[in-house]
Amino acid sequence: MAILEIRKYPEKVLKQKALPVAAFDQELQVLIDDMIETMYAAPGVGLAAPQVGESKRLAVIDISTKDEKVPLLVLINPVIVESEGSIEFEEGCLSIPEYTANVKRAEKVLVRAQNREGESIEIEGADLLAIALQHEIDHLEGILLIDRISPIKREFFKKRQKKIQKLNK
């Protein structure tokens, strides 16, 4: 297993719609294991394949805390089939370090996907799990956290990023 490089905004792969996974082969299994290790090392609660430079509809999520262990989710070709309610939550993103924003999302979602063996699964998520599911599926659609904030906040973010890039040159 290996820790992969997490791609950062504004890399193009983050804005592209990921391709469906068709082959559930050893190469995919290695990528899944590497993504899990990368997510834990970051540390984060979720990671989508485009964030490690792979245009695949694949995400891993683990919202466990010290007090509450929840099963690790491996989602391949996930689709939100139902959503209800509304919740606003301060989100961060491994691809946009040191930035958080309040984002409105559905409070509950039903997601259909395949597991790492290619079997169909359904996941019902509420609250933090619903937020994580929507956030990672957004990555697979080429949608970033900053695409979910107001135009004014997005402009402030872009100005801040330009300043950071100038400082890093």
Image (cartoon, grey):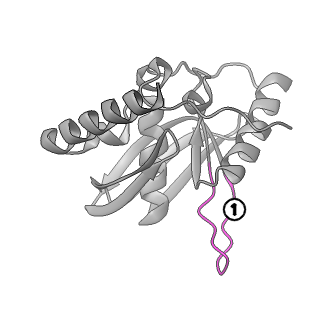
The picture quadrant where one finds residue 58 is top right
- The extreme bottom residue here reads 67
Q: Residue at x 85, y 25 (%)?
A: 26
The question of residue 6 being in magenta is answered with no
Type of the residue with mark 1: Pro
Which residue lies under the disc numbered 1? 71
The question of residue 71 being in magenta is answered with yes
Residue 99 falls left or right of residue 152: right
Question: Dividing the image into 4 quarters, which one contains the N terminus?
Answer: top right
Query: In this picture, which residue range is highlighted in magenta?
Result: 61-73
Q: Position of residue 92 (x, y in %)?
A: 43, 52
Residue 46 falls left or right of residue 40: left
- Residue 136, compared with residue 15, is above or below; it is below
- Residue 31, compared with residue 103, is above or below; it is above
| Residue nearest the viewer, comparing 55 with 95 | 95
Residue 115 falls left or right of residue 124: right
Classified by dominant secondary structure, the portion drawn in magenta counts as loop
The picture quadrant where one finds residue 108 is bottom left
Classify mark 1: helix, strand or loop: loop
